[in-house]
């Protein structure tokens, strides 16, 4: 897979993730977010299962792919679990601010695991990315930024950011000759198992019966587009891009959320956040150009 196609996949995944925010706001709040996320994973697995289980070559890959999928989903699911636990004690603004550190954390992890280096121009780009996304998150209000206070929930979300960064690293480490669709399926199945365990440990009821009939279509969209497709696109792009380049697209998340929300509500975005948008786009472009283009993964038998 060439890098140009991988970048297109990441842009598509970022747009799909951004589109999930206004849709998620429509889904009932009577069901715990972890339970809702489990529902998304279950629907995604049901939709993908016929394509994987119906092909002999894919079924043969399951024995080697499933343990790898579990390893990936530990950190993938861990991100969601820690994020929702954090949001019980902190605000979306706080988590959005901390989330801007994920690309830099991933780059540092890559230094340790893959022996890569962070160039000065990359550090500048990471700074621009943080400033840009924070600018968008706070809608250009620096008074709100100054008044930001960290709490217990923020500590939990730092754990979520570390889990997301590790998810990016572990994908590069475990991927072999398995088809991406098989690895995506195994990751989602692993997510179902891990989040089911989290519900039991945290004593959270499913309460799926509380989902109104008119919101089923929203859940199906979140399951197929924001869960299944994004998982596949990110894992597919990851075969051609480094973890640092993949996570750099996080800087575009608030930008796409802003534009999609503006279209959804038929209103223009606040021009006060234009500098933040420019900084975020600039950081993403610079990191795609100057970040290390490949990493060496040493496996048994190499």
Image (cartoon, grey):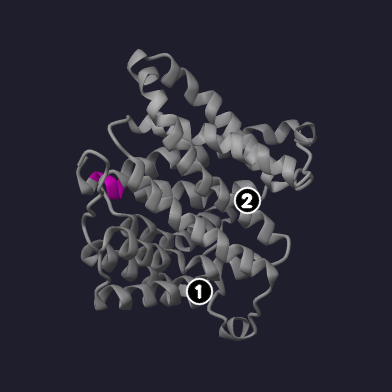
Residue 34: image x %, image y %? 67, 45
Frontmost of labels 1 and 2 is 2
> Tag 2 or tag 1, which sits nearer the N-term?
2
What residue lies at 51% left-to-right and 35% top-to-bottom?
188
Question: From the image, which quarter does the N terminus lie in?
Answer: top left
What kind of element bears circle 1?
A: helix
Q: Quadrant of residue 107?
A: bottom left
Using residue 70 as the reference point, say whether residue 181 is left or right of it.
left
- Residue at image mark 1: 134
Q: Is residue 6 magenta?
A: yes
Mark linked to residue 81: 2
Q: Nearer the viewer, residue 32 or 144?
A: 32
Residue 149 lies within the magenta run:
no
Q: Give left or right: position of 3 versus 213.
A: left
In front here: 1 or 242? Answer: 242
Determine crowd level at label 2: few under 14, some 14-19, many 20+ residues with C-alpha closer than 10 A. Answer: many
Which contiguous range is marked in magenta?
5-9
Q: Position of residue 14 (x, y in %)?
A: 43, 51
Look at 59% across and 50% down and name the residue there: 80
Label count reads: 2
- Quadrant where the C terminus sits is top left
Where residue 59 appears, as percent x and y from the top left, is: 40, 18
Disc 2 is placed on an element classified as helix
In the rendered image, is residue 93 in sight?
no
């Amino acid at each position: 897979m060439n890098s140009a196609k991988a970048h297109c996949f990441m842009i598509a995944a970022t747009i799909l993730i951004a589109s999930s925010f206004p849709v998620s706001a429509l889904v009932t709040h009577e069901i715990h977010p972890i339970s809702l996320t489990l529902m998304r994973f279950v629907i995604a697995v049901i939709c993908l299962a016929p394509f994987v289980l119906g092909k002999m070559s894919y079924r043969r890959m399951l024995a080697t792919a499933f343990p790898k999928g579990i390893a990936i989903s530990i950190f993938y699911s861990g991100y969601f679990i820690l994020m929702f636990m954090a949001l019980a004690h902190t605000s979306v603004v706080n988590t959005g601010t901390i989330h801007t550190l994920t690309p830099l954390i991933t780059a540092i992890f890559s230094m340790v695991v893959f022996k890569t280096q962070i160039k000065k121009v990359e550090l500048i780009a990471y700074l621009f990315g943080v400033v840009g996304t924070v600018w968008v998150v706070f809608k250009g209000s620096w008074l709100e930024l100054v008044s930001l206070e960290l709490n217990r929930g923020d500590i939990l979300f730092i754990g979520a950011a570390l889990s997301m960064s590790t998810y990016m690293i572990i994908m590069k480490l475990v991927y072999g000759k398995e088809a991406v669709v098989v690895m995506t399926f195994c990751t989602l199945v692993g997510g179902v198992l891990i989040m089911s365990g989290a519900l039991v440990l945290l004593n959270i009821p499913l309460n799926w019966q509380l989902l109104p009939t008119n919101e089923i279509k929203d859940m199906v969209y979140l399951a197929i587009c924001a869960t299944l497709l994004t998982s596949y696109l990110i894992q597919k792009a990851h075969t051609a891009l480094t973890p640092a380049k993949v996570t750099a697209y996080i800087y575009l998340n608030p930008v796409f959320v802003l534009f999609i929300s503006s279209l959804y509500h038929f209103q223009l975005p606040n021009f006060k956040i234009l500098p933040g948008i420019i900084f975020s786009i600039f950081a993403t472009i610079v990191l795609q150009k100057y970040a290390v283009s490949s990493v060496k993964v040493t496996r048994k038998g190499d």
